[in-house]
Image (cartoon, coloured by chain):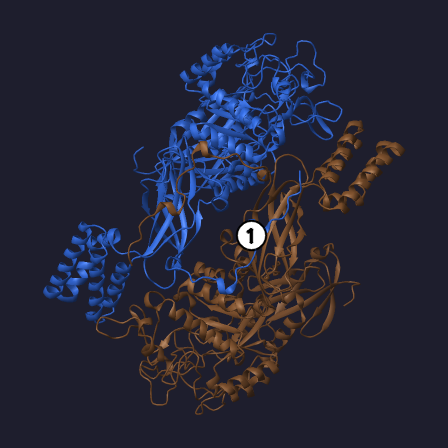
Chain colours: A blue, B brown
Amino acid sequence: MKRATVVVSELDLSAPEAEQFPLPDASERISIGGVWPEIDGGRYPAKATVGDLVDIECDILSDGHDLIRAQVLTFGPGGPQGGRETPLVPLGNDRWRARIRLSESGDHRFTIEAWRNPFATWVEQAEARAAAGQDLAVELLVGRQLIVEAAEQSETGEDRAAFRNMLAAFDQAQSDGGTRAVLALVTAQEARALFERAGPRSHFTRYERALTIRAERRAASFSAWYELTPRSQSGDATRHGTFADVIDRLPYVRDMGFDVLYLTPIHPIGSTNRKGRNNSLKAEPGDPGSPYAIGSADGGHDAIHAELGTPAEFRALVAAARAHGLELALDFAVQCSLDHPWIKEHPEWFDWRPDGSIRFAENPPKKYEDIVNVHFYGQSFPGLWFALRDVVLHWVREGVRIFRVDNPHTKPFPFWEWLIRTVQGDHPDVIFLSEAFTRPKIMRHLAKIGFTQSYSYFTWRNTKLELTDYITELTKGPSVAYMRPNFFVNTPDINPFYLQTGGRAAHRVRLALAATLGGNYGVYSGFELCEAEPLPGKEEYNNSEKYELKAWDWDRPGHIREDVRFLNRLRRSSPALQTFQNTKFYNAWNDQILYYGKATEDLAEFLLIAVNLDPHNPQECDFEVPMWEFGLPDHATIEVEDVASGVHFTWTGKVQHMRLDPETMPYVVWRLRPLGRSA
Amino acid sequence: MKRATVVVSELDLSAPEAEQFPLPDASERISIGGVWPEIDGGRYPAKATVGDLVDIECDILSDGHDLIRAQVLTFGPGGPQGGRETPLVPLGNDRWRARIRLSESGDHRFTIEAWRNPFATWVEQAEARAAAGQDLAVELLVGRQLIVEAAEQSETGEDRAAFRNMLAAFDQAQSDGGTRAVLALVTAQEARALFERAGPRSHFTRYERALTIRAERRAASFSAWYELTPRSQSGDATRHGTFADVIDRLPYVRDMGFDVLYLTPIHPIGSTNRKGRNNSLKAEPGDPGSPYAIGSADGGHDAIHAELGTPAEFRALVAAARAHGLELALDFAVQCSLDHPWIKEHPEWFDWRPDGSIRFAENPPKKYEDIVNVHFYGQSFPGLWFALRDVVLHWVREGVRIFRVDNPHTKPFPFWEWLIRTVQGDHPDVIFLSEAFTRPKIMRHLAKIGFTQSYSYFTWRNTKLELTDYITELTKGPSVAYMRPNFFVNTPDINPFYLQTGGRAAHRVRLALAATLGGNYGVYSGFELCEAEPLPGKEEYNNSEKYELKAWDWDRPGHIREDVRFLNRLRRSSPALQTFQNTKFYNAWNDQILYYGKATEDLAEFLLIAVNLDPHNPQECDFEVPMWEFGLPDHATIEVEDVASGVHFTWTGKVQHMRLDPETMPYVVWRLRPLGRSA
């Protein structure tokens, strides 16, 4: 708490003296900048998915007209050995691009190199002079000298021999065929390639920083989550659910096509100040309490609530889920109940008030009477940090590789950065989802410091303008380099007004949006039953599972399991839906109809999706078929498949008409195929 | 030319090992980022004008709800002593701002500091608890303890006494008036201020970089240039003009209100391969040659063409210009004529071909037969660099403080960065204008590496959309931190088609745009006479002064000297026109009428400017009077002055109508004043 003294010597705060301003070295003749991806000067890693193509771009500037060559130099997680060179290609306007594929998970490093190629420059100028009919006699001497120098500067005998052969060929051509023959020789692919590979590199420059791209497994960027509360899976509101009950639910979840089964906390629940139904301050006898009030005499964050099962039964659930193609995700919520063992074992990790009482979690004047927060500095550091890391590693050892992290924005950023880096250092397949519904820069910062996925504002983006703006920001803005949103349609804490008031159609609308717009998306169980009964006036569920046991009729009328199944299967079979960044909005002349395309880069798959955002009324409009994406004229004919029905038809002409009735089908997915292209 | 070996150890290209990932220190709890102005991670300085307010902004992020305090720490060109602290104020959305004024020219350094204020946090929470009617007994003990700790940690006896006094007052208030009295004490300004100034600063953080802002004199950002060719100022095309002739022209230039008189090169002109009229390859006897073919037996870049005058006469011109309120600017063109003394003295600075001939300047297949270029590396380094620096310093000693630099983009960036920094280190008042008409990133880069001003694309931005986009980019885009465009309406090399075809009205239009939109702007003499005779089909002047002596009738009919005088005087008297960044475009429903406002930040001066971009036809339209800028309703009445005529009137209602006739007045400047505000 001591006020830090200003020690200006730590930073160079003085302006350099003019006489000290050094003469630069030659390498600065080429300037490399505007590198993508580079986050905060390289302070944070960019993110990528193993196996995906990653675009690396930069500006390369120099004076004059000499030809520039450039490459990306990449190093895998193994270290600085064996860097890989990928040529950068000019895009125009001094922008360059290389595409690389990271085939291993972990932190890859890259930097950029550029140089002038004097021979290529000479060839280009010789061609221009020849085309203008200028005499080349002296210029040929210049070119010949470049070959001589290349031979002299060769790094291997093989290269030297190649340049000497080229010199001999040059002289032969000149004596046999004169200028024209020499030009044919030096502009031939072989000569160019030799110089590109082994020729002198003038004013060689390397970018001043090495940058990091963190490659993570596919599920980091593409996953469909299903969240449930294990204790409410018995089918009987009077019987506490068990892991075995969850195992019985696996076929149901799997049949809907989800990838991840996410469980709310499974740890012992405190009894002191236990919350009652609907978050009431007083629990009735038998009330189970909030699973987020973690810890009792039975144990803390690495223990299991006894009524759910044993560690062995948990392991059985992990295995069964895996057998059903599902991965289990656990909730990592750092707060403790008042009965958590840590309070006695490590009182120094908690805030105590001057009267000797422990400080509840609070955001004054709001209080959370059933939980207390740890603090992360002072006497907690680093003991608590290691303890929390060990909690995560415990569940990693139990077979869990995905953690949904509760409210990370109320714990210090350095803790998360350290925790994630430390865990992923040994287990690069571990995924952390940030449950931070807070201010935008905080949410982005959590993604920067390492969270694999992030909850987002999608849950509250309902109108066409909101959705268009938000998706554009997420897919085209700078955060695309490091933030992977997970589009949850609802959560135990969030029962959006749109769902409360829009009925079954609203649920289908939000599902279709989340499943097609989000690389990652999630639903909290009950959503597929269109359960949306609110606490009056609030965006919360009435009689929430957070505070009581529930029983659900999973076949109750009006469910939308068919939609879930259709959309999840479509996601799995459609490469176009497996990239988050490829959404393009097209014109549909109705503000209630959101209309967009998702296509693979080679257009092998091209999906058009239209969603009627109005859950109460049929909406119709003319819309533009993006014929231009295929290079087709506006009057072209294109083949279309209605993916849900499998019906095939054609559209002729760019402007077509659609009508979407929320009662029958509030969304549609079309697959486009130019005539004559095989399916 | 040796190919550089990849030495990966120079950069840390290996990913850090997980076990090496260190525990962070407490200071990282607060993250400072998104700093403005920061250019390429601090690699280049931002620019500011001495005396102007500079906004410094950043994002400050931390976990939880504790109150953050932050400040900018600035150090003047003198060095790291006596940093100045300026509080940062939160703008919302985690953005903070401070405004500083740099009162000295040179490189200022700044960084940002942030910390948590535990006492302010406690006060805020105590107030919230009290408002919710909660019992504060224990919380008051917490607050009291904060005062005790503050006293213990005080850095001076004075502070310690202040905190002890506060503690006594706290105890007294509690015993006299209880909780309410204590709250009154701790929320009082005195207590808050004491803690802000001298209280503990928790999790104190300093931004990881110190950044530079280069403060330059007013003429760097606000100046009106008049360019002329000295040898054509005799009034007689058969008599070579002299510096004395230029002195005779000073009243004329001064009467038009210009600030800078810029002369094309004044150095000896080569005779070998001298260009004839209209850039012909063969000069006729008596042809003076291009002043850009610098150097003869009489001397090079530090010599004066004998027909213009002597060094003493040049100094007389400098002094006379100053007496007329004009500053002289010289042309700095690095190329040499074939007769330049350096070619004999320093053959190693030039490119020689294998047959022993010197290489002309060229961009194959184009050749510039009357000049040769120096090269900057190899044997030129650093001798040539020092020689060129000495040329600039020579003219600085002769009283010149402004240099227009010819084609800087064909010389290495490191040379310019070094040259400018070196010259400005001793002479911070020296201004360099970059004459680079090239690709946008190159132009921006030249500004980054130090050029004070930059030629721009304004010369070719003619339509409403072009102008709106370009001005928005220049004033709102990131380059505003370092690039100051100079809006030249024409140059000896550029006779824009718009001026060629638009006649007198076109000249008035472009003048009005340049003078009101550009902080810096310039005209090349003849423009005010509406001289626009082209080389057929080209954007060049016929019979250009670059290759022959000319005589001008400065009073010839149709000149627009009145416009120049009006606009330049308006610029000098209107603070609203002296800031480049403050242009705001408003609605005028006619694509030929550009309509914008320039106002001081306090709205003390508010100018509306409308320009009819169509030089051939009257244009009219409804337009919006921005009543909202003054907080006035749409139906309000506002006082207006037509600045050119001095006529006063009022507008009632937001929508008004205008008609601009290019024959009479293609532009209008209105000064707005809310009713009742004195002039």
Measuring from the top left, give residue A544's x and y in whole percent: 63, 19
**Residue tagged 1:** B210
Q: For the residue labelled by badge 1, is the local secondary structure a helix, a strand or a loop?
A: loop
> Can you give x and y, in whole percent of width and height, for residue B43 in the image?
49, 55
Amino acid type of the residue that numbered disc 1 sits on in the rendered structure: Ala
Quadrant in the rendering for residue A148: bottom left
* Residue lying at the far left of the rendered structure: A176
Q: Residue at x 38, y 63 (%)?
A: A63
Q: Residue at 58% of width from left, 17% of height from top?
A: A300
- With A443 as the anchor, is B279 left or right in this view? left
**Identity of the residue drawn at 43% across and 85% down:** B305
Q: Residues within 10 Å of mark 1 (few under 14, many from 20)?
A: many
Quadrant housing residue B121 = top right
In what quadrant of the picture does the C terminus of chain B appear?
A: bottom right
> Which residue is situated farthest in the right direction here?
B176
Q: Does B421 sit above or below residue A344?
A: below
* Residue A257 at least partly seen: yes
Residue B192 at x, y percent in the picture: 76, 43
On the picture, is A664 further left or further right than B167? left
Say if residue A490 shows up in the picture: no
Question: Which quadrant holds the N terminus of chain B?
Answer: bottom left
| Chain letter of the residue carrying label 1 | B
In x, y percent, where is residue B470?
Answer: 52, 60
Foreground residue, A137 or A543? A137
Q: Nearer the viewer, residue B568 or A359?
A: A359
From this view, report whether residue A297 is shown above or below residue B174: above
